[in-house]
Amino acid sequence: MYPLKIPSHKELYSSTIFGVTCGAKDKLIENLTLPSLEIDDWLILKNMGAYSLGLHTSMNGFFVPRMFYVTDFNNLTRYGLSEFNYKFTKTILKEATDDRTNLNEEFRVTFCLDFIL
């Protein structure tokens, strides 16, 4: 898991990411080091598959989040995504690199897509 933007400060915190159930078993990631996050900050989670959204619940007043798919242009054509109704919402990861991780190489992604249903 990586924050999309590089924080302006270098202070990092030991973090745990929980799901929306507020239950102890709804722990997604433990002992993760992250910068201080703000509302509307994005986190990139590598290798999240089809069941990631399927496990989401609207319990406790949370709603299913708007999902964005991150890919490169080759995958758009290779998997036929060029026929879907989508728009490019952002070109990302141009500045999302730091001394620890080159996200562009790690994820090999360029575009963030918003599918229009």
Image (cartoon, rainbow, N blue to C red):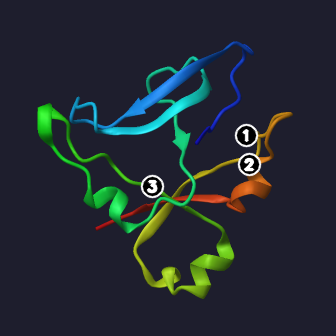
Q: Secondary structure at mark 2?
A: helix
> Which of the 4 image quarters holds residue 84?
bottom left
Q: Say the numbered circle drawn on residue 30.
A: none
Does the CB distance between marks 2 and 3 fall below 8 Å?
A: no
Q: What's under tag 1, amino acid-wise?
A: Ala
Label 1: how many Cα within 10 Å (few below 14, some 14–19, many 20+): some
Distance from disc 3 to disc 1, alpha carbons, whole Å, reads: 17 Å
| Residue drawn where x is 72% and y is 62% of the image | 108
Q: What's under tag 3, amino acid-wise?
A: Phe
In this rendered view, identify the residue nearer to me: 19 or 23: 23
Q: Secondary structure at mark 3?
A: loop
Does the CB distance between marks 3 and 1 fall below 8 Å?
A: no
Q: Which residue is mark 1?
A: 96
Q: Nearer the viewer, mark 2 or mark 3?
A: 2
Q: Which residue is mark 3?
A: 68
> Which of the 4 image quarters holds residue 97?
top right
| Residue drawn where x is 44% and y is 68% of the image | 86
Residue 47 percent coordinates (x, y): 54, 60
Q: Say the numbered circle drawn on residue 103.
A: 2
In the figure, 101 relative to 48: above or below?
Answer: above
Q: Nearer the viewer, mark 1 or mark 2?
A: 2
Residue 104 percent coordinates (x, y): 76, 53
In the figure, 61 relative to 90: above or below?
Answer: above
Taking 108 as reference, is 76 left or right? left
Q: What's under tag 2, amino acid-wise?
A: Leu
Sequence order check, earlier mark of 3 and 1:
3
Q: Quadrant of the N terminus?
A: top right
| Residue drawn where x is 66% and y is 73% of the image | 73
In this rendered view, identify the residue nearer to me: 75 or 116: 75
